[in-house]
Image (cartoon, grey):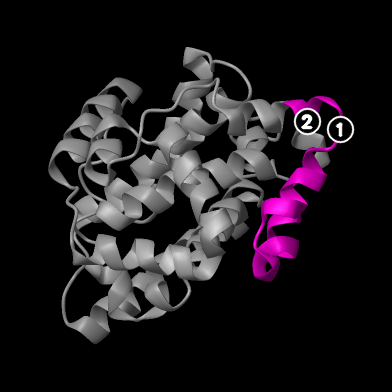
Amino acid sequence: MRYFIDQDSIVRKIWGQTDTILFIFAGSSAEFALNKAVDWLYFTGRLPADPIGRLFSTVSYARAIVFSENQAALRAIDSMAAIHAQVEAKRHAQIPDWAYRDVLSMLIDYSIRSFELLHRKLTHEETNEIFAVFNRVGQQMGLKDLPETLEAWQDMRIQQLQSDLIFSKYTHDLFTQYRKHLGSFRFRLLLEAQALMAPAPVAELLHLRKATRSHPLIITYKLFRAIGLDDLLKQLILPARHKSQIMALDMPAQRP
């Protein structure tokens, strides 16, 4: 059977672990709130009504692509494009291509950052593989002006972070919703995780304090993982509503 991604791909290792996915989620939740096209996510009302569920659905689509055989993955990408087209039809406008490229860049960037934060430095070949996988997703969606190489993407990413982010009323409201849906304790954990994951422009706009790999959150997690209690820690910190869904993301065969 032919899969969209090789079964020994680093992308499968990253997206087959709850811990790396949660940090991808944390980084994306910060940047989503700042993106100049976030009003599109407010148009249907689903994002402010359930921001955790909405971001989790994005993760679910990504995993459906990563772990599916080729034709099923292509259908998932086409389904995602069709949903966006329905929203465009209701609003009588088109989501700009740059907004799609920004989301793909988030998936690439935070996949890299999350794995390197929790595990080890990726090789150039592994980093290039992550880029290539999500670039193929963009190509299947018919996006224009996608970068052709990892180096071109890295240049594009710098430009995106400089030009496509702004602290807006949507940013303020979305963080209010994060706090409301997570509660004070988990919201504080989210902010700490965002500080660990955020590129400098994101951290500056959100006034996130600088954090390093010696952060207590990382030290505590790695200690629990070393003694085999990382699942217990995740059970304690995850929101009850999404706990079973998130814990089900872990695929033992993919753990490093």
Bounds of the magenta segment: 223-251
* Mark 2 secondary-structure assignment: helix
- How many circles with numbers are drawn on the protein? 2
- Distance between the Cα atoms at labels 2 and 1? 5 Å
Q: Position of residue 223 (x, y in %)?
A: 75, 26
Based on the displayed image, in which of its 4 quarters is residue 216 positioned? Answer: top right
119 vs 75, nearest the viewer: 119
> What residue sits right under mark 2 in the picture?
225
Q: Amino acid at mark 1?
A: Gly
| Residue located at (25% from left, 76% from top) | 88
Residue at the right extreme of this rendering: 228
Q: Residue at x 23, y 69 (%)?
A: 39
Closest to the observer, 203 or 209 = 209
Compare residues 43 and 77 and report the one nearer the observer: 43
Q: Main secondary structure of the magenta part?
A: helix
> What residue do we see at 40% from left, 34% from top?
109
- Binning the other alpha carbons within 10 Å of mark 2 as few (below 14), some (14 to 19) or many (20 upward) gives some
Residue 256 visible? The answer is: no
- Which residue is at the front of the view, 190 or 104? 190
Above or below, 210 against 181 in this view is above
In the image as oriented, which residue stretches furthest toward the front? Answer: 184
Magenta stretch holds residue 186: no
Is residue 92 in view?
yes
Single out the residue that lies furthest toward the bottom.
90
Asked whether, in this view, residue 237 is left or right of residue 184, the answer is right
Residue at position x 69%, y 33% in the image: 221
Amino acid on which disc 2 is placed: Arg
Q: Residues within 10 Å of mark 1 (few under 14, many from 20)?
A: few
The residue wearing badge 1 is 228
User: Decide: marks 2, 1 in contact (CB < 8 A)?
Assistant: yes
